[in-house]
Amino acid sequence: MLIEDKPRAIITPQKETVRQNGRRIKEPDEPMFTITATDRHGVVHEGRIRTLMPIECWRLQGFTDEQFYKAQAMGLSDARLYKMAGNSVTVPVITAIGEKIRAVNEKYQIVRCAT
């Protein structure tokens, strides 16, 4: 039984058999599901589902509002804007991974030079 005490992330509620890691609803303080082009993402609270708007998906992927509005101004449908967000690479995550790789590389080079 679902006790609705706080908003929860939800993914494609009408797909009973297709789930992300076996779940369609997260606990209140868990992060959102990974955004995909094929699923509907939203937040359930007090029995209502609020789906994410295309601009919110773009923001979650690290794009600026200006970038979103430029794409929207090209006359792209919301479906296409959702798909573009779902198919993108999350820039802040890739940046963080690159910084970790650089730090490990720099540490390795210092150790290697010392031996």
Image (spheres, rainbow, N blue to C red):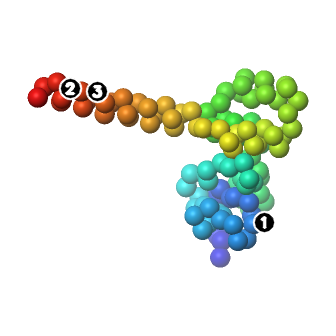
Task: Give the number of the disc on residue 66.
Answer: none
The quadrant of the image that shows the N terminus is: bottom right
Q: Against 42, is 13 above or below? A: below
Q: Residue at x 62, y 61 (%)?
A: 20
Where's residue 51, x and y in %?
76, 50
Alpha carbon of mark 1 to alpha carbon of mark 2: how far?
A: 54 Å
Disc 3 marks a residue whose amino acid type is Glu
Where's residue 86, x and y in %?
69, 44
Give the number of marks: 3
Alpha carbon of mark 1 to alpha carbon of mark 3: how far?
A: 49 Å
Instruction: Name the one closer to the observer, 94 or 112.
Output: 112
> Viewed as shown, does residue 110 lie left or right of 31?
left
Helix, strand or loop at label 1? It is loop
> Viewed as shown, does residue 42 lie left or right of 60?
right
The residue beneath circle 2 is 110
Disc 1 marks a residue whose amino acid type is Gln
Dot 2 alpha-carbon crowd within 10 angstroms: few under 14, some 14 to 19, many 20 or more: few
Task: Give the number of the disc on residue 14.
Answer: 1
The residue beneath circle 3 is 106
Q: Residue at x 13, y 25 (%)?
A: 114
> Viewed as shown, does residue 12 lie left or right of 21?
right
Q: Against 71, is 6 above or below? A: below
